[in-house]
Image (tube, grey):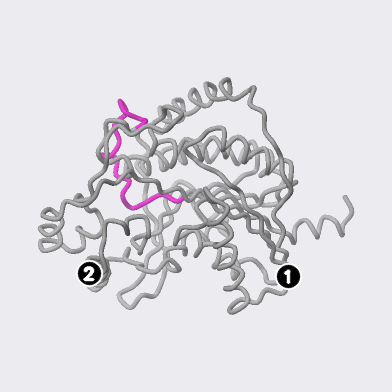
Protein backbone atom coordinates (compact mmCIF):
# COMPACT_ATOMS: atom_id res chain seq x y z
CA UNK A 1 0.00 0.00 0.00
CA UNK A 2 1.44 3.37 -0.99
CA UNK A 3 1.97 6.15 1.56
CA UNK A 4 -0.78 8.25 -0.07
CA UNK A 5 -3.23 5.34 0.04
CA UNK A 6 -2.40 4.67 3.69
CA UNK A 7 -3.01 8.33 4.53
CA UNK A 8 -6.33 8.30 2.69
CA UNK A 9 -7.39 5.23 4.65
CA UNK A 10 -6.36 6.78 7.95
CA UNK A 11 -8.17 9.99 7.08
CA UNK A 12 -11.42 8.20 6.32
CA UNK A 13 -13.39 7.17 9.40
CA UNK A 14 -16.37 4.84 9.16
CA UNK A 15 -18.75 4.66 12.12
CA UNK A 16 -21.75 2.43 12.75
CA UNK A 17 -24.22 3.56 15.41
CA UNK A 18 -26.83 0.94 16.23
CA UNK A 19 -30.01 2.63 17.34
CA UNK A 20 -29.05 5.80 15.48
CA UNK A 21 -32.65 6.95 15.34
CA UNK A 22 -32.94 7.20 19.15
CA UNK A 23 -32.29 10.49 20.94
CA UNK A 24 -28.94 9.21 22.23
CA UNK A 25 -27.93 7.66 18.90
CA UNK A 26 -28.61 10.84 16.95
CA UNK A 27 -26.66 12.93 19.47
CA UNK A 28 -23.72 10.53 19.28
CA UNK A 29 -23.75 11.18 15.52
CA UNK A 30 -23.91 14.94 16.08
CA UNK A 31 -20.94 14.83 18.44
CA UNK A 32 -18.93 12.68 16.04
CA UNK A 33 -19.20 15.51 13.52
CA UNK A 34 -17.28 17.64 16.01
CA UNK A 35 -14.94 14.93 17.31
CA UNK A 36 -13.59 13.56 14.02
CA UNK A 37 -11.16 16.09 12.44
CA UNK A 38 -13.11 18.35 10.06
CA UNK A 39 -10.91 17.62 7.06
CA UNK A 40 -11.32 13.85 7.38
CA UNK A 41 -13.82 11.98 5.29
CA UNK A 42 -16.50 10.63 7.60
CA UNK A 43 -18.97 7.91 6.69
CA UNK A 44 -21.86 7.41 9.09
CA UNK A 45 -23.74 4.14 8.77
CA UNK A 46 -27.21 4.73 10.18
CA UNK A 47 -29.06 1.69 11.47
CA UNK A 48 -32.78 1.33 11.78
CA UNK A 49 -35.55 -1.22 11.48
CA UNK A 50 -37.09 0.76 8.60
CA UNK A 51 -35.77 2.71 5.64
CA UNK A 52 -38.13 5.62 6.37
CA UNK A 53 -36.62 6.19 9.83
CA UNK A 54 -33.09 5.81 8.47
CA UNK A 55 -33.81 8.46 5.82
CA UNK A 56 -35.27 10.79 8.43
CA UNK A 57 -32.24 10.40 10.67
CA UNK A 58 -29.80 10.98 7.79
CA UNK A 59 -31.70 14.15 6.89
CA UNK A 60 -31.43 15.42 10.47
CA UNK A 61 -27.68 14.76 10.67
CA UNK A 62 -27.06 16.42 7.30
CA UNK A 63 -29.06 19.45 8.40
CA UNK A 64 -27.12 19.65 11.66
CA UNK A 65 -23.83 19.58 9.77
CA UNK A 66 -24.98 22.29 7.34
CA UNK A 67 -26.11 24.56 10.17
CA UNK A 68 -23.46 23.85 12.79
CA UNK A 69 -20.27 21.92 12.09
CA UNK A 70 -19.94 22.57 8.33
CA UNK A 71 -17.28 19.90 7.92
CA UNK A 72 -14.59 20.52 5.32
CA UNK A 73 -14.12 16.87 4.44
CA UNK A 74 -16.58 14.58 2.74
CA UNK A 75 -19.53 13.56 4.87
CA UNK A 76 -21.41 10.63 3.45
CA UNK A 77 -23.98 8.18 4.69
CA UNK A 78 -25.11 4.63 4.34
CA UNK A 79 -28.02 2.82 5.94
CA UNK A 80 -28.19 -0.60 7.50
CA UNK A 81 -31.59 -2.17 8.09
CA UNK A 82 -31.14 -4.45 11.06
CA UNK A 83 -33.38 -6.02 13.68
CA UNK A 84 -31.44 -7.20 16.73
CA UNK A 85 -34.21 -9.64 17.66
CA UNK A 86 -33.79 -11.45 14.33
CA UNK A 87 -30.59 -13.46 13.93
CA UNK A 88 -31.00 -13.72 10.14
CA UNK A 89 -31.26 -9.93 9.97
CA UNK A 90 -28.01 -9.62 11.93
CA UNK A 91 -26.31 -12.12 9.63
CA UNK A 92 -27.49 -10.24 6.54
CA UNK A 93 -26.37 -6.90 7.96
CA UNK A 94 -22.87 -8.23 8.65
CA UNK A 95 -22.72 -9.75 5.18
CA UNK A 96 -23.64 -6.41 3.56
CA UNK A 97 -20.98 -4.59 5.54
CA UNK A 98 -18.32 -7.08 4.52
CA UNK A 99 -19.34 -6.74 0.89
CA UNK A 100 -19.37 -2.95 0.85
CA UNK A 101 -16.55 -1.90 3.19
CA UNK A 102 -12.93 -2.81 3.67
CA UNK A 103 -12.84 -1.64 7.29
CA UNK A 104 -14.98 -0.35 10.14
CA UNK A 105 -13.44 2.12 12.60
CA UNK A 106 -16.12 2.58 15.24
CA UNK A 107 -19.04 0.40 16.25
CA UNK A 108 -21.52 1.76 18.77
CA UNK A 109 -23.79 -0.74 20.46
CA UNK A 110 -26.71 1.45 21.48
CA UNK A 111 -29.46 -1.10 22.02
CA UNK A 112 -32.13 -0.20 24.57
CA UNK A 113 -35.10 -2.50 24.03
CA UNK A 114 -37.60 -2.83 26.83
CA UNK A 115 -40.92 -4.65 27.17
CA UNK A 116 -42.74 -2.06 29.21
CA UNK A 117 -46.37 -2.43 30.21
CA UNK A 118 -46.90 0.98 31.78
CA UNK A 119 -46.41 2.72 35.11
CA UNK A 120 -47.53 1.99 38.63
CA UNK A 121 -48.75 5.52 39.28
CA UNK A 122 -49.35 5.02 43.00
CA UNK A 123 -45.83 3.69 43.51
CA UNK A 124 -44.42 6.44 41.29
CA UNK A 125 -46.11 9.13 43.35
CA UNK A 126 -44.82 7.65 46.62
CA UNK A 127 -41.25 7.37 45.35
CA UNK A 128 -41.18 10.85 43.85
CA UNK A 129 -42.44 12.44 47.07
CA UNK A 130 -40.17 10.45 49.38
CA UNK A 131 -36.92 10.57 47.39
CA UNK A 132 -36.95 12.46 44.06
CA UNK A 133 -33.32 11.61 43.28
CA UNK A 134 -33.76 7.87 43.76
CA UNK A 135 -37.15 7.90 42.06
CA UNK A 136 -35.71 9.42 38.90
CA UNK A 137 -32.46 7.44 38.95
CA UNK A 138 -33.45 3.94 40.06
CA UNK A 139 -37.24 3.81 39.58
CA UNK A 140 -39.13 0.71 40.59
CA UNK A 141 -42.49 1.85 39.23
CA UNK A 142 -41.91 1.04 35.55
CA UNK A 143 -43.84 -2.13 34.83
CA UNK A 144 -42.21 -4.68 32.53
CA UNK A 145 -43.72 -7.75 30.92
CA UNK A 146 -42.32 -11.14 31.89
CA UNK A 147 -41.42 -14.05 29.62
CA UNK A 148 -41.48 -12.24 26.25
CA UNK A 149 -39.62 -14.17 23.55
CA UNK A 150 -38.50 -13.15 20.09
CA UNK A 151 -39.42 -15.06 16.94
CA UNK A 152 -36.08 -16.80 17.32
CA UNK A 153 -37.25 -18.25 20.63
CA UNK A 154 -34.77 -16.24 22.69
CA UNK A 155 -35.56 -13.85 25.50
CA UNK A 156 -36.50 -10.72 23.55
CA UNK A 157 -34.71 -8.15 25.73
CA UNK A 158 -31.74 -10.48 26.16
CA UNK A 159 -31.41 -10.87 22.40
CA UNK A 160 -32.06 -7.23 21.51
CA UNK A 161 -29.72 -5.64 24.03
CA UNK A 162 -26.95 -8.17 24.46
CA UNK A 163 -26.80 -11.38 22.46
CA UNK A 164 -27.75 -9.88 19.10
CA UNK A 165 -25.14 -7.10 19.38
CA UNK A 166 -22.56 -9.61 20.68
CA UNK A 167 -23.18 -11.81 17.66
CA UNK A 168 -22.80 -8.80 15.36
CA UNK A 169 -19.45 -7.91 16.92
CA UNK A 170 -18.26 -11.49 16.48
CA UNK A 171 -19.20 -11.35 12.78
CA UNK A 172 -17.43 -8.00 12.30
CA UNK A 173 -14.20 -8.66 14.23
CA UNK A 174 -12.12 -9.14 11.09
CA UNK A 175 -13.53 -6.01 9.46
CA UNK A 176 -12.88 -3.96 12.59
CA UNK A 177 -9.32 -5.29 12.84
CA UNK A 178 -8.49 -3.70 9.49
CA UNK A 179 -8.87 -0.22 10.98
CA UNK A 180 -5.85 1.66 12.32
CA UNK A 181 -7.62 2.18 15.66
CA UNK A 182 -10.83 0.15 15.89
CA UNK A 183 -13.22 0.79 18.76
CA UNK A 184 -16.34 -0.95 20.04
CA UNK A 185 -18.43 1.09 22.46
CA UNK A 186 -21.21 -0.52 24.45
CA UNK A 187 -23.93 1.68 25.92
CA UNK A 188 -24.82 0.31 29.34
CA UNK A 189 -26.85 1.99 32.06
CA UNK A 190 -26.81 3.25 35.63
CA UNK A 191 -29.52 0.65 36.21
CA UNK A 192 -27.28 -2.40 35.95
CA UNK A 193 -26.95 -3.51 39.55
CA UNK A 194 -25.87 -7.12 40.19
CA UNK A 195 -29.17 -7.74 41.98
CA UNK A 196 -31.05 -7.32 38.69
CA UNK A 197 -29.52 -10.47 37.18
CA UNK A 198 -30.05 -14.10 38.14
CA UNK A 199 -27.56 -16.62 36.77
CA UNK A 200 -30.39 -19.14 36.62
CA UNK A 201 -32.17 -16.85 34.14
CA UNK A 202 -29.56 -15.38 31.80
CA UNK A 203 -32.13 -14.86 29.04
CA UNK A 204 -34.19 -12.81 31.51
CA UNK A 205 -37.41 -14.69 30.82
CA UNK A 206 -38.42 -14.90 34.47
CA UNK A 207 -37.36 -11.38 35.34
CA UNK A 208 -39.62 -8.38 35.85
CA UNK A 209 -36.56 -6.12 35.43
CA UNK A 210 -35.32 -7.54 32.14
CA UNK A 211 -34.04 -4.19 30.82
CA UNK A 212 -31.86 -3.61 33.88
CA UNK A 213 -30.73 -7.24 33.83
CA UNK A 214 -29.69 -6.92 30.19
CA UNK A 215 -27.47 -3.96 31.04
CA UNK A 216 -25.83 -5.96 33.84
CA UNK A 217 -25.10 -8.61 31.22
CA UNK A 218 -23.52 -5.91 29.01
CA UNK A 219 -21.18 -4.94 31.84
CA UNK A 220 -20.12 -8.53 32.54
CA UNK A 221 -19.72 -9.42 28.87
CA UNK A 222 -17.51 -6.38 28.37
CA UNK A 223 -15.27 -7.32 31.30
CA UNK A 224 -14.96 -10.86 29.98
CA UNK A 225 -14.14 -9.88 26.38
CA UNK A 226 -12.19 -6.62 26.17
CA UNK A 227 -8.72 -8.11 26.70
CA UNK A 228 -9.29 -10.87 24.17
CA UNK A 229 -10.55 -8.41 21.55
CA UNK A 230 -7.47 -6.26 21.92
CA UNK A 231 -4.91 -9.08 22.13
CA UNK A 232 -6.28 -10.98 19.13
CA UNK A 233 -7.72 -8.23 16.92
CA UNK A 234 -6.36 -4.90 18.17
CA UNK A 235 -9.93 -3.80 18.96
CA UNK A 236 -10.32 -1.41 21.90
CA UNK A 237 -13.63 -1.99 23.63
CA UNK A 238 -15.20 0.31 26.22
CA UNK A 239 -18.45 0.34 28.14
CA UNK A 240 -20.23 3.61 28.91
CA UNK A 241 -23.47 4.86 30.39
CA UNK A 242 -25.33 8.06 29.40
CA UNK A 243 -26.80 8.98 32.77
CA UNK A 244 -30.43 10.10 32.92
CA UNK A 245 -31.82 11.95 29.91
CA UNK A 246 -35.03 12.37 27.96
CA UNK A 247 -35.52 9.17 26.02
CA UNK A 248 -38.42 8.76 23.63
CA UNK A 249 -38.85 5.03 24.26
CA UNK A 250 -41.28 5.59 27.14
CA UNK A 251 -43.27 8.46 25.63
CA UNK A 252 -46.33 6.37 24.82
CA UNK A 253 -47.01 6.01 28.54
CA UNK A 254 -46.84 9.76 29.18
CA UNK A 255 -49.13 12.68 28.37
CA UNK A 256 -47.88 16.29 28.14
CA UNK A 257 -48.57 16.86 31.83
CA UNK A 258 -46.64 13.80 33.03
CA UNK A 259 -43.84 14.40 30.51
CA UNK A 260 -43.17 17.90 31.82
CA UNK A 261 -43.59 16.56 35.34
CA UNK A 262 -40.81 14.09 34.57
CA UNK A 263 -38.57 16.89 33.27
CA UNK A 264 -39.27 18.92 36.40
CA UNK A 265 -38.30 15.92 38.53
CA UNK A 266 -35.03 15.58 36.59
CA UNK A 267 -34.11 19.20 37.29
CA UNK A 268 -35.04 18.82 40.95
CA UNK A 269 -32.78 15.76 41.19
CA UNK A 270 -29.91 17.67 39.61
CA UNK A 271 -30.36 20.58 42.01
CA UNK A 272 -30.36 18.10 44.89
CA UNK A 273 -26.88 16.97 43.88
CA UNK A 274 -27.36 14.14 41.40
CA UNK A 275 -24.48 14.09 38.89
CA UNK A 276 -26.38 11.82 36.52
CA UNK A 277 -29.30 13.98 35.39
CA UNK A 278 -27.90 15.19 32.10
CA UNK A 279 -31.44 15.61 30.72
CA UNK A 280 -30.25 16.48 27.18
CA UNK A 281 -29.22 13.80 24.69
CA UNK A 282 -26.16 15.89 23.80
CA UNK A 283 -24.74 15.69 27.34
CA UNK A 284 -25.73 12.02 27.57
CA UNK A 285 -23.52 11.32 24.53
CA UNK A 286 -20.44 12.77 26.24
CA UNK A 287 -18.95 9.52 27.59
CA UNK A 288 -19.73 7.43 24.48
CA UNK A 289 -17.86 9.92 22.31
CA UNK A 290 -15.02 10.53 24.76
CA UNK A 291 -13.85 6.91 24.59
CA UNK A 292 -13.07 7.29 20.89
CA UNK A 293 -9.89 9.06 21.97
CA UNK A 294 -9.30 7.16 25.22
CA UNK A 295 -5.79 5.75 25.63
CA UNK A 296 -5.80 2.21 27.00
CA UNK A 297 -2.45 2.87 28.71
CA UNK A 298 -4.02 5.56 30.89
CA UNK A 299 -7.82 5.18 30.50
CA UNK A 300 -8.86 1.92 32.12
CA UNK A 301 -11.09 -0.50 30.25
CA UNK A 302 -12.45 -2.32 33.30
CA UNK A 303 -14.57 0.64 34.41
CA UNK A 304 -17.76 2.15 33.08
CA UNK A 305 -17.40 5.68 31.74
CA UNK A 306 -20.37 7.81 32.68
CA UNK A 307 -21.81 11.05 31.32
CA UNK A 308 -22.33 13.39 34.25
CA UNK A 309 -22.98 17.08 34.83
CA UNK A 310 -22.80 19.73 37.55
CA UNK A 311 -25.70 21.57 39.18
CA UNK A 312 -25.49 24.15 36.39
CA UNK A 313 -25.42 21.52 33.66
CA UNK A 314 -21.71 21.58 32.84
CA UNK A 315 -20.77 18.15 31.55
CA UNK A 316 -17.95 15.96 32.81
CA UNK A 317 -16.99 12.28 33.05
CA UNK A 318 -17.53 10.11 36.09
CA UNK A 319 -16.27 6.54 36.16
CA UNK A 320 -18.03 3.66 37.86
CA UNK A 321 -16.47 0.43 39.09
CA UNK A 322 -18.03 -2.77 37.76
CA UNK A 323 -18.54 -5.81 39.98
CA UNK A 324 -16.99 -8.67 37.94
CA UNK A 325 -18.80 -11.49 39.72
CA UNK A 326 -19.96 -14.05 37.17
CA UNK A 327 -18.26 -12.60 34.07
CA UNK A 328 -16.68 -15.91 33.07
CA UNK A 329 -19.97 -17.77 33.43
CA UNK A 330 -21.65 -15.16 31.23
CA UNK A 331 -18.96 -15.43 28.56
CA UNK A 332 -19.16 -19.23 28.52
CA UNK A 333 -22.93 -19.04 28.07
CA UNK A 334 -22.63 -16.58 25.20
CA UNK A 335 -19.91 -18.56 23.46
CA UNK A 336 -21.97 -21.74 23.65
CA UNK A 337 -25.08 -19.97 22.37
CA UNK A 338 -23.08 -18.43 19.52
CA UNK A 339 -21.93 -21.87 18.38
CA UNK A 340 -25.55 -23.05 18.37
CA UNK A 341 -26.56 -20.11 16.17
CA UNK A 342 -23.54 -20.54 13.90
CA UNK A 343 -24.87 -24.00 13.17
CA UNK A 344 -28.47 -22.80 12.66
CA UNK A 345 -27.42 -20.02 10.29
CA UNK A 346 -24.72 -21.78 8.29
CA UNK A 347 -26.95 -22.42 5.27
CA UNK A 348 -28.65 -19.03 5.17
CA UNK A 349 -28.57 -17.31 1.78
CA UNK A 350 -27.84 -13.60 1.92
CA UNK A 351 -28.18 -10.88 -0.68
CA UNK A 352 -25.93 -7.87 -1.05
CA UNK A 353 -26.84 -4.39 -2.18
CA UNK A 354 -25.07 -1.22 -3.14
CA UNK A 355 -24.25 1.37 -0.42
CA UNK A 356 -26.72 4.14 0.15
CA UNK A 357 -25.17 7.21 -1.47
CA UNK A 358 -25.74 10.84 -0.45
Q: CA distance from mark 1 to mark 2?
A: 44 Å
Horizontal side of 104 relative to 141 (left or right) equals: right
Ranked by sequence position, the earlier of labels 1 and 2 is 1
Number of numbered markers? 2
SS for tag 1? loop
Numbered circle sitting on residue 73? 1
Q: Position of residue 68 (x, y in %)?
A: 58, 78
**Residue topped by disc 2:** 257
Image location of residue 166, percent across then percent down = 51, 37
Left or right for 269, reference 351: left
Q: What secondary structure is marked by label 2? A: helix
Question: Which residue is drawn at the image coordinates 41% and 43% (left, top)?
Answer: 219
Look at the image and give the residue range highlighted in magenta: 187-203
Residue 302 in magenta?
no
Nearest to the observer: residue 22 or residue 189: 22
Q: Is residue 252 above or below residue 64?
A: above
* Closer to us: 132 or 82: 82
Asked if 158 appears above or below 276 in the picture, the reply is: above
Q: Nearer the viewer, mark 1 or mark 2?
A: 2
Q: Nearer the viewer, residue 49 or 345?
A: 49
Instruction: Residue 264: name its quadrant.
Output: bottom left
Out of 248 and 224, give the one closest to the viewer: 248
Q: Is residue 213 left or right of residue 330?
A: left
Amino acid sequence: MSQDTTKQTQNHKIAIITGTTSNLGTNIAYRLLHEIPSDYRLTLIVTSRTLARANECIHDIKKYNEQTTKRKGILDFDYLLIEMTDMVSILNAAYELKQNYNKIDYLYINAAQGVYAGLDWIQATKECLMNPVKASTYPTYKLQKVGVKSRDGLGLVFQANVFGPYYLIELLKELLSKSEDPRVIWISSLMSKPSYLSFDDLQLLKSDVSYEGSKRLVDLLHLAKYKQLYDQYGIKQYVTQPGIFTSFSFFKFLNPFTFYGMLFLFYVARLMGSPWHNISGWKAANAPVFVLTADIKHDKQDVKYGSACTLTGKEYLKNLEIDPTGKDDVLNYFQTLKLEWDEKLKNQITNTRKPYGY
